[in-house]
Every structure is written in C-alpha cells, then in structure tokens.
Amino acid sequence: MANEIDPSDSMGALYGSRLRRYRLEAGWTQGDLGFRAHVVQSRINQLERATGAKPTLELSKKLDKLLNTDGLLEELTPHVRREAFPDWAQEHLKQEGRATAIQVYMARTFHGLLQTREYAHALLSLSPTLTSEEHLQKRLTGRMGRQPKLKDPKLREFWMVLDEAVLMRPVGSPAIMRGQMARVLEAAQDPHVTVQVLPFAAGGHWPMECSLMMLTLPDGDASAYKEADEFGHLTEENDEVQAYGKGYDRLRAMALPPEQSLDLIQSVMEGTYRAARVPSRFQRRRLAEKQLQRHGGRLVRRGGRRLPGGDARA
C-alpha cells in the first residue's frame, strides 16, 4: 500500500510497520489509537512512517498494552533510538516553534534566535558541506526565519547560559562581533529574556563538549536536545529530561548573575574586558536582588527557577 514503508530500511521502519499492522488488526484509525494513547494523531503517523522524534519507552509501553503486542514495541524501542537520525535537528526546530519556554546552554556560538544576520552569515559560511552561494543563502534564510519566535507572546521565557568562549572567539570581523553582542544586550532588556555568562573561572562542567536546549511545550511536555558538530540527540524521556534539567540548574548556579553577565558582555564589546571573577555567595545574592528589582520583582529561588505563579518550567 502507498502508506506502508519497507521494514528492512531501518529499525524505525520496522517499528513503524509493526505498529501499523497491529493498529489495523485492532480496527483502529491513527486518530483512534492516538486518542487512547493520549497523543495527537500526527504522532502515530510519524511513528508509522519513521519520521519525526523517535518513540519513547513510556509511549511504547502504552501502545503495547493497547494493541496487545506482548511487549514487542518496547523491545524495539532501544534499538530504534540508537539508530543514526539523519534529520536530527528537524523535530527539535519544530518543537522550538511551539515552545512556551526555552532554556539553552551555548558552548560555541550564540543561539540562532539571537544571531544577527551578519554573524549567522559568517558562521554558516564556515560549513564544509556548502555547495554554492545559493545553498548558503537558503540556510541563512532558514536561520533568520526562526527569529520571530523570540517575540512570540506564547513564549514566556527564553533563558540563555553562554559560555565565555563564545564571547572570546571571533566569528567574522570585529564589527560583526560587536553587532552580535549589542544584539544580545538589546534582547536581554525584554522581561522574558535572561542571559548569563559561564566564565572560564567556573572550571569544568557538564556539558562541555556540546550545547544543550531544553524546551517546554504548550501541553506541558518537555524535551532536551544536545548538539555538537554533525551530531544531535533529542530526547523526550521523562527521566532523561529531568536529569538534563538538573544539569542545567547547576550551570545557572555556576554562571555569573544576569546583571554581571551583561556587564561582562558590554566590556568585551567595548574592548575593556578583564577576566571575569566568580562573585562570592553574598555578592551573588546582592546582584540577584538588584536584577529582580530591575525586572519588576519577579521571584526566583536558588538555582534560578521562578517560584510557582511564574511561567518558567525547566
């Protein structure tokens, strides 16, 4: 049939074909199964066609129970998730467009939602996989097309922890770097945008080898996405997302307070930078209180999360 896929193509295709077969044997549509499993119909379609995010163990267990598959889908899930995922970034970007909270740690570059066109052009130009100027412009258009998300009224929080290395490593000309840092300082004036710098003085930390993006979706679900050169890993498993969330809380605790972070960025931009010194606990508290007053007295508990009644969710 036209909608079927070849189960020999991949473990994802095998999972999808078995899911489809058992669903049809039960006499259910994709919508019927989605309703019973408490997921949208498009999620079932993605699983059956081996597109989008990979299945979670939690969802596979639900499907096994509903379809009476004797645990087959749960057994296949680890193998599906270990497979190479060629469109690893696409599902994350789709979720980014819907997210109500975005928390990121950037190890090497400024986040795409905050990149100036000049910085993005210089950065994308470095890729060895570019085939033409047209190819570069297509990628640049895609990068810039994401940026309205930062002004989306549904986005309650954008929190970025920026490794100090990002400020120190020039991309393009000095003028491009100054413009990029000015863009970050401007964005940080919005109440829902918080920027922290993780200084070299903080020492070793997790993660050091890649960037991390944490997303909260409108239905309350969350995902975590780790990205390095030519590699990305998206997870929606509750245990993994929660573990990454705790790791992100530690990063925020190690980073400079928001106001001192902006002062550091300003000094780098103006050429008056001095190596950052990690403030004492007392200094952190005073700086945090000052930052809260600037942003209207929003309550923040230790670790950086807002208290109940705010809109943040790690």
Image (cartoon, rainbow, N blue to C red):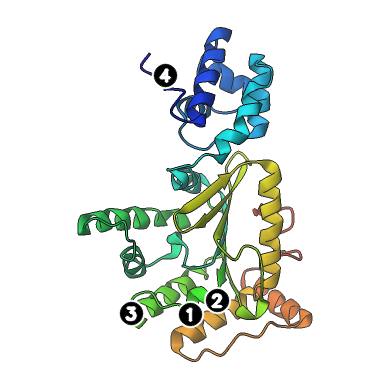
> Which residue is under mark 3?
173
| Residue 55 in sight from this viewpoint | no
Q: Position of residue 109 (x, y in %)?
A: 46, 67
> Which residue is under mark 1?
168
How crowded pointer 4 is (Cα within 10 Å; few <14, some 14-19, many 20+) is rated as: few
For this rendering, which residue is in front, 284 or 22? Answer: 22
- In space, the residues marked 4 and 3 are separated at their CA atoms by 51 Å
- In space, the residues marked 2 and 1 are separated at their CA atoms by 7 Å
Q: Position of residue 251 (x, y in %)?
A: 66, 66
Residue drawn at 58 percent across, 18 percent down: 33
Residue drawn at 65 percent across, 16 percent down: 69
> Which residue is under mark 2?
164
Q: Quadrant of residue 256?
A: bottom right
Going by the image, does 187 lie left or right of 26?
left
> Which residue is under mark 4?
4
The amino acid type, in three-letter code, at marker 1 is Met
Marks 1 and 3, the one that precedes in the sequence: 1
Residue sitting farthest toward the front: 8
How crowded pointer 1 is (Cα within 10 Å; few <14, some 14-19, many 20+) is rated as: few
**In the rendered structure, are the residues bearing label 2 and label 1 in contact, judged by CB atoms less than 8 Å apart?**
yes
Helix, strand or loop at label 1? It is helix
